[in-house]
Each structure stands twice: as structure tokens, then as C-alpha cells.
């Protein structure tokens, strides 16, 4: 197995876990605003996917973010960072469609050769890094925020990560 295939599989696995955690939420559960400074699942989900899009497509592959056309079609802010201030409804079905479009982009990750993965770029917040770093970051950010979304579900009395997924995490 080559390096780009392994990175693609890791990001794909992170998308799978995220999909499992948000699956079956009702619109009320998805939009629930917890007390304090915690964020609703809908905004966490949008942020998680858009962040992966940013690191994977814009930074690593050098293509426009899928968010740019997707957001326009579903009535979300064109600047994904503005999601935190967005007061409109974010629909789970729309975010699941966005996730599917991001999965389609994994073929671009798999097409990278080792020289492309070693190409240096300037990663916001991190400085000079290589393409492989930002691709790992895309997957890690999905995994980290999947845990945060699981905690937000727990605030509503819902199960976050499945027992099987928890056992997987604990095996490391």
C-alpha cells in the first residue's frame, strides 16, 4: 500500500466515524444549543466537514473547497468560518450530502505521489509543513470533533460513540 492510499483510508475512516455519530439525529437534537459556550451539533458537524475540506482540497490538493458551491446550493454562508455566527437552519441531510461529496475527493488524495506528499506549503496556524501533514490534520480533526459531537449528544442523554468504536479507540 502506498502513502497516499493510507492517508486516504485514514480520512475515510474518520468520515465513517463522524457519519455514525450523527446518523439518526432528529432536527431538534441536531440543532440543540447546550448551556454555556458549547456549540450545537449542527455547527460542529459543518465546521468539522468544512475544516476537512479546507485541509484536504484547498491546502493539500490545491483545488477549490467543495464548500464554495455546496454552501450556495443549500443557503449557508459562502465563508465557512462564518458558520459560527449563522442563525439559520443547518440540515443534517445537507451535511450528509456534503460529506459524500468530500468522500469523492479522496480519489484526488490517492492520486498523489510521494513527491507531492512531501511538497512544502504554509499551513495556517502551523507554518511551513508538508502536504502529508495537512492530510493527516484533516483526518485528525474529524476524529477529534467526532468526540466533541459525541459529548454534545451525551448532554442530551443520547449515546455518542458506539461501544465498538470506543473499544477501538481504547485499543491504542
Image (cartoon, rainbow, N blue to C red):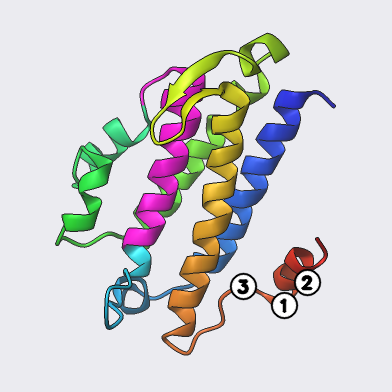
Q: Which disc number belongs to residue 167?
A: 2
Label 1 CA crowd tier, 10 Å (few <14, some 14–19, many 20+): few
Q: Are marks 1 and 2 in contact (CB under 8 Å)?
A: yes
What secondary structure prevails in the magenta region?
A: helix
Query: Separation of disc 3 and disc 1 at Cα?
Result: 6 Å
Q: Which residues are magenta?
A: 43-64
Q: Quadrant of the N terminus?
A: top right
Instruction: Specify whether residue 143 is painted magenta.
Output: no
Query: Separation of disc 1 and disc 2 at Cα?
Result: 6 Å
User: SS class of the residue under badge 3?
Assistant: loop
Give the residue furthest to the top: 115
Left or right: 72, with 27 as reference point: left
Q: Which disc number belongs to residue 161?
A: 3
- The residue that disc 1 covers is 163
Compared to residue 37, the image places residue 142 above or below, namely: above
The mark closer to the camera, 1 or 2, is: 2
Compared to residue 29, the image places residue 95 above or below, namely: above
- Position in image of residue 156 (x %, y %): 42, 86
Q: Are marks 3 and 2 in contact (CB under 8 Å)?
A: no
Q: Which disc number belongs to residue 104?
A: none
> Is any atom of residue 74 visible in this view?
no
Left or right: 77, with 18 as reference point: left
Q: Splitting the image into 4 quarters, where does residue 21 fall?
A: bottom right
Q: Residue at x 80, y 60 (%)?
A: 172
- Position in image of residue 160 (x %, y %): 56, 76
Label 2 CA crowd tier, 10 Å (few <14, some 14–19, many 20+): few
Q: Splitting the image into 4 quarters, where does residue 131 fall?
A: top right
Q: Residue at x 47, y 46 (%)?
A: 99
Amino acid at each position: 500500500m502506498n502513502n497516499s492510499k493510507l492517508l486516504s483510508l485514514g480520512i475515510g475512516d474518520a468520515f465513517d466515524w463522524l457519519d455514525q455519530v450523527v446518523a439518526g439525529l432528529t432536527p431538534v437534537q441536531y440543532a440543540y444549543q447546550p448551556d454555556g459556550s458549547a456549540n450545537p451539533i449542527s455547527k460542529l458537524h459543518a465546521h468539522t466537514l468544512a475544516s476537512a475540506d479546507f485541509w484536504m482540497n484547498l491546502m493539500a490538493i490545491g483545488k477549490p473547497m467543495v464548500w464554495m458551491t455546496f454552501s450556495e446550493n443549500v443557503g449557508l454562508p459562502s465563508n465557512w468560518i462564518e458558520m459560527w455566527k449563522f442563525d439559520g437552519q443547518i440540515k443534517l441531510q445537507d451535511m450528509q450530502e456534503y460529506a459524500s461529496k468530500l468522500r469523492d475527493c479522496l480519489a484526488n488524495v490517492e492520486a498523489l505521489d510521494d513527491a507531492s506528499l512531501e511538497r512544502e506549503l504554509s499551513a495556517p496556524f502551523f507554518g511551513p509543513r508538508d502536504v502529508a501533514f495537512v492530510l493527516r490534520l484533516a483526518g485528525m480533526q474529524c476524529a477529534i470533533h467526532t468526540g466533541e459531537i459525541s459529548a454534545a449528544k451525551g448532554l442530551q442523554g443520547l449515546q455518542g460513540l458506539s461501544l465498538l468504536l470506543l473499544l477501538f479507540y481504547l485499543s491504542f
